Image (cartoon, grey):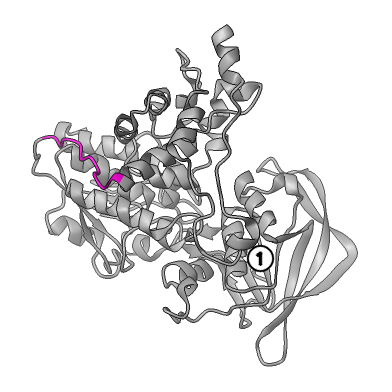
Amino acid sequence: MEQKAKKEKVPRQPMPEQEPKVRAKNFQEVPLGYPPDIAMREASRCLQCKNPTCRTGCPVEIDIPAFINRIKEGDFKGAIAKIKEKNALPAVCGRVCPQEVQCENNCILGKKGEPVAIGRLERFSADWERAQGEVSIPEKEAPTGKRIAVVGSGPSGLTVAGDLILKGHDVTIFEAFQIPGGVLVYGIPEFRLPKAIVAAEVEYMKKLGVKFQCDMVVGATVSIDELFEQGYDAVYIGVGAGLPAFMRIPGENLIGVYSANEYLTRSNLMKAYLFPKYDTPIIRGKNVVVFGAGNVAMDSARTALRLGAERVRIIYRRSREEMPARIEELHHAEQEGVELLLLAAPLNFIGDGDGRLKGVRCQRMELGEPDESGRRRPEPIKGSEFETECDTAVIAIGAGANPLLTKKTPDIQLNRRGYIIAEPETGKTTKKGVWAGGDIVTGQATVILAMGAGRMVANSIHNYLTLGW
């Protein structure tokens, strides 16, 4: 007990980061990462529990106490090696995964105080290895002669590929865009996940032996059946949920109204944030409103600030307590000057006569009884309509399943919302030799949950190819 009390006296170490007023004007990464001495100090807080509950909160089952103990001892090389036994994308997960509701939420220290900063330590380990320029490559099992096609190079696809290549299989990833990374590249802004980080993780996959074919739209350029005809023994579908969702209110076709999917893709993948080097067409609004309150809404609002907006507001129909965004992302957004307009819902957009957005008409809301999500249902207040000016609007209320691939593969069964039906324990679809996982099965979720699905599917594919399961 004395040992535990002593360790709890070390406070959770804050992450150095850019000043809000500075970072709101640039696209450089906000948190700057732990230096080695601070990482070791934070690692010293870990109690090294005999039954570590933190591991139960990790979808990819990293041996968390083991890698943290190695950081504490200054064995940074050993720490990253331990992480990579289970996670091929540690630099990504250390930045964008919601550790506060997963591993850190289960940390014993967190019961009475601040949990160990597991995500920050994971990021430190990955960044340390990359800085050394000597990325370790684990041993691969003997070649099996089996070929796997992975459709989509997002987090679940990269995980499937990384796991199966180590098991001795030949793996090719097919990506619709011109560069790999999926949502990690087109969806998450540079200030939260630098493109160089994703590129380094992709390069690691290539060193493992994974092959990439970009500009390949499976379902259009090539079909699933044609992949089998080309000699692939199994196919994994990890295309995400990239179909933009709209609010279906009047005026959504006005110039200046974007889906978050388009807005972030133009900024991230098409590099509007690097203007004038890249002159990507995007409206650089001065008065921007964002609808929604998840991480994508925060990314959109913070991007708008960095593109030159003088005022950015998030309009959300519920209260602050119901906002699904990570606490850290909301905190950063407010620090940078993003305003919240809560308990308000849009009724229609207002044009200027030339087809351009000039405002939005909204209605005040109040919270009623909980709905199926467990959150209190927003209900309109009669006679509370109001108008507010804006020249750009971003709709960030979620996304759906893109039907491009599934329409061309009718023997893959879908649910009523268009997502692929897959066995929960294996990821198997109704088409023999085809698996699916990540957002195309679950709907929009987190990076780490998609990776957890990829880990499960990789094991199932391996058993199918080697044992006939």
Q: Which residue in the rendered view is the most extreme toward the bottom?
A: 354
Q: Residue at x 47, y 46 (%)?
A: 95
Q: Position of residue 423 (x, y in %)?
A: 38, 39
Residue 134 is one of the magenta-drawn residues: yes
Above or below residue 236? Residue 100 is above
> Based on the displayed image, in which of its 4 quarters is residue 10 positioned?
top right
Magenta residues, start to end: 132-141
Please say whether residue 422 is visible from this viewpoint. no
> Based on the displayed image, in which of its 4 quarters is residue 411 positioned?
bottom left
Q: Residue at x 61, y 28 (%)?
A: 11
Quarter of the picture holding the N terminus: top right
Is residue 432 shown left or right of residue 53?
left
Amino acid type of the residue tagged 1 in the rendering? Val
Q: Which residue is mark 1?
A: 290
Q: Position of residue 433 (x, y in %)?
A: 23, 46
Towards the viewer: 466 or 289: 289
Q: Residue at x 51, y 66 (%)?
A: 264
Quarter of the picture holding the C terminus: top left
Q: Label 1 neighbourhood size at 10 Å, few (<14), some (14-19), many (20+)? A: many
Residue 424 is one of the magenta-drawn residues: no
Determine the main secondary structure of the stretch shown in magenta: loop
Element type at mark 1: strand
Towards the viewer: 123 or 318: 123
Above or below residue 285? Residue 82 is above
Is residue 362 shown left or right of residue 292?
right
